[in-house]
Image (tube, coloured by chain):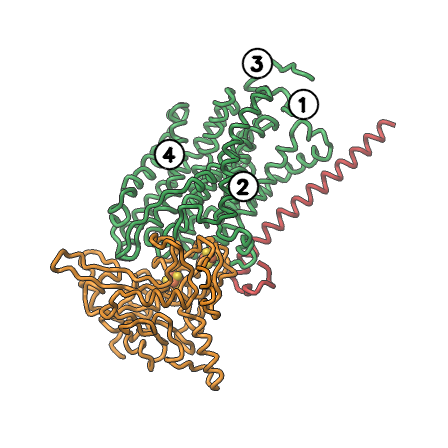
Amino acid sequence: MTQDNHNNAYKFGMVIDLDKCTGCGSCMVSCMSENNVPFKEDESNKRDSITWMRVYKLTNGKSFPDTEIAYLPRPCQHCGGEGDHGHSPCVSVCPATATDYGYDTGIVSQIYTRCFGCRYCMGACPYHARYFNWWDPKWPEGMEKYLSPDVSPRMRGIVEKCSFCYHRYQAARDKAYYHGDKDHIKEEDYQTACTTACPSNAITFGDLNNPAHKVHQIVKPDPHPDPRNHHVVGKSRNPKVFRLLERLGTNPKVYYLSEREWVRKQGDHYLEGEWDKIKNHHGTTSHG
Amino acid sequence: MDSALIPEGAKRCSLPKFSIGMAIVGAVLLWGVWAMFLCWFKGLNQTNMNDYYGFALWIWADLAVIAVGGGAFFTGMLRYIFNIKELKNIINFAVIIGFICYSSALLILAIDIGQPLRGWFIFWHANIHSMLTEVAFCLSCYFAVLTIEFIPNILENRQANKVPFFHHLAHNMHGIMVIFAATGAFLSFFHQGSLGGVAGVMYGRPFAVREGLLIWPWTFFLFTWSAAAYGPSFTLLVTKMTEVITGKKLVKDNVVHLLAKISGWMIVTYIIAKIIDTIYWAYVTAPSLGFKLSHFYTDNSFYGYWILITEIVICGIVPGAILVIKSTRENPTLRLVAIILGTIGVCLNRWVMVLQIMAVPVMPFDTWALYIPSWQEVATTVLPVAYGIMLIALAYRYLPVFPQEKELNSVKPITESE
Amino acid sequence: MFPFSFEWVWDIGHMIFFGGLWYAVGILSAGMIYVILKAAWDTMSESINNSGESH
Ligand code: SF4
Ligand code: SF4
């Protein structure tokens, strides 16, 4: 039996407008403070510092005056895995079931007290969205008082990653329950920290399964498998929208939007001549 | 002084000389133990691993020792299940090498995990879909098998064997060894394979991912096969080293030739499979994901095509050919070259399947990541080597490891007594 | 690992995986118990025989 979260469940996701993103890093900062992400005294080595949300810089590779730059914020993509069955690259490999796929939300969780730090999931994630706690978390004197009480801090020796601010989902669910409609969380009641912090409104977050949500309207996800690659489900029918490394079949729930072709092309790898054939292929049918 | 413990009729160096040797190796061992405690108490920040290199030197060492330790299960299978009699002259040693390799692998894993005290979660909260879960279970069980196979040899020590219970226990264990060996072969098949599966199922990593059969990617079969192929080569290599160090012939040539021949044929068949796998991956799997072969071997300062050629041609086809051709196989120098190349080849394969996977950029705007291990990682990797040398030295000194030793070295009977 | 740990489900995957595992563990432990008991038995009967002979 395979499970999916196409029906009767939320499928939270986001779309990030790369033409609006200025690379200011507000999303990174808000994410760190929202989620009690520990930091080091010297954060210059990006390969061992924790950034659940990380902004990458892309360039079109051309020299002046044709140089163009784009910024690409990268949270955990909350991959649905091949065929969108919930076997995310990381979830399927974790030997201790310490990271799990929520079939009710589409969110990939991380169970801090269960993870024993084998780091297999980090190897399996092509987006480098997973971070290991190489050190004990330490906050400068007095700063512990500013930690969020809704998010448990993590201990040394385990892996952590973006949770789509799961505690905010829990709060929204509680609120919906309180108002007597526990199955319908309002769009505005559950928004991630990065979404709300972005000064240029580049991030749109919501339920990809809900046509009333803005994210659904922008992405127009195709519920059918891509006829060219059956592992790919939920491809956007918006020609300006793409996902990172979509061809691997990881089925991320984070989409990117750009008017610029060179930016969209950097979302994946293409053999020579392939891009021109593929770029206009979006989804199975044209409805929606 | 310790001659009462030394196997009857065997000649060993004096105890002081032996102790000095042990002390030197022991110093290296202590260095490793020191690094091990640093990692346990201060955490993995003692290493040069990072978020790109979650798997690094240790996992390579793990895979490598398990691959070369594969000689134990394969030789055991041939000896007990296929009943190839000659191999009884080398099986004890193959088992000891396997025991060392597997205990080392378990130790390295215990250092490698971020929360060693939670190590048992892998069993308790097992996710049966993870290759690593299968590895953990089969590895531990197979280690138990190796211990069981090693015990009779220990009990055959001159003094231990005088205790009637131990004498009978060793005898009875030999009696049903075929059952243990069969279970060991079953477990080995799965954990060797699953170690290959660890890489093959990472479908987010185009360098690693492979198609396969049912739930098993091709790397599953390739790893089992290569361990069975190169493991016996490593057994022969360590036997050769022991012979050189002790200055004695310990195993007859016909036994060596037989094992070399088996290893050779396994290597040849393996390397054919590996070439097919590589070609299919390079021309079908990777391109279907948008990757050209050159993506994996260019634009960085270390991983070039040389690694592919070294692994497959120099350390695969060459030793395979040397070992299957009778005249080259029976030439001691060429045979030695072949078993050294073979051992390097399988270790290189494991290196590629761990570290190169981590090094290759996957996101189009990402960069190659190279890594140099810290001294703590190196020391903890050397630790098992030192431990292995000590255990082999002890076993050789006090246990009847090589049944043919007496016959091959019977110049004059030893008349030492105390 | 055990049916009472909460991630356990009675599906085919768990049955094959843990079936194989417990089977292997069972064989190993049964084998060891057998040889130990047999060795104890052999030792005892030997010593009885010996003492019988010496008197
Ligand atoms: S982005 Fe990485 S961590 Fe997040 S779900 Fe995908 S594979 Fe897992
Ligand atoms: S590091 Fe933790 S979450 Fe990742 S695979 Fe290992 S146990 Fe699972």
Which chain is disc 2 placed on?
B
Q: Earlier in the sequence, mark 4 or mark 2?
A: 2
Q: Earlier in the sequence, mark 4 or mark 3?
A: 4
Task: Name the mark on residue B320.
Answer: 4
In contact (CB < 8 Å): disc 4 and disc 1 = no
Closer mark to the observer between disc 4 and disc 2: 2
Q: Earlier in the sequence, mark 4 or mark 1?
A: 1
Q: Amino acid at mark 3?
A: Val
Task: Name the mark on residue B4.
Answer: 1
Alpha carbon separation for disc pair 3 and 2: 37 Å
Q: Colour of chain B?
A: green
Alpha carbon separation for disc pair 4 and 1: 44 Å
Alpha carbon separation for disc pair 1 and 2: 29 Å
Q: Amino acid at mark 4?
A: Gly
Alpha carbon separation for disc pair 4 and 3: 36 Å
Alpha carbon separation for disc pair 4 and 2: 29 Å
Question: Label 3's element?
Answer: loop
Q: Residue at x 65, y 25 (%)?
A: B5
Q: Residue furthest front?
A: A141
Q: Colour of chain C?
A: red
Q: Amino acid at mark 1?
A: Ala
Determine whether C15 is above or below B31 in the image: below
Q: Is C49 or B6 nearer to us in this picture?
A: B6
Q: Amino acid at mark 2?
A: Ser
* Ligand 1 image-quadrant field: bottom left
Which chain is disc 1 placed on?
B
Q: Colour of chain A?
A: orange
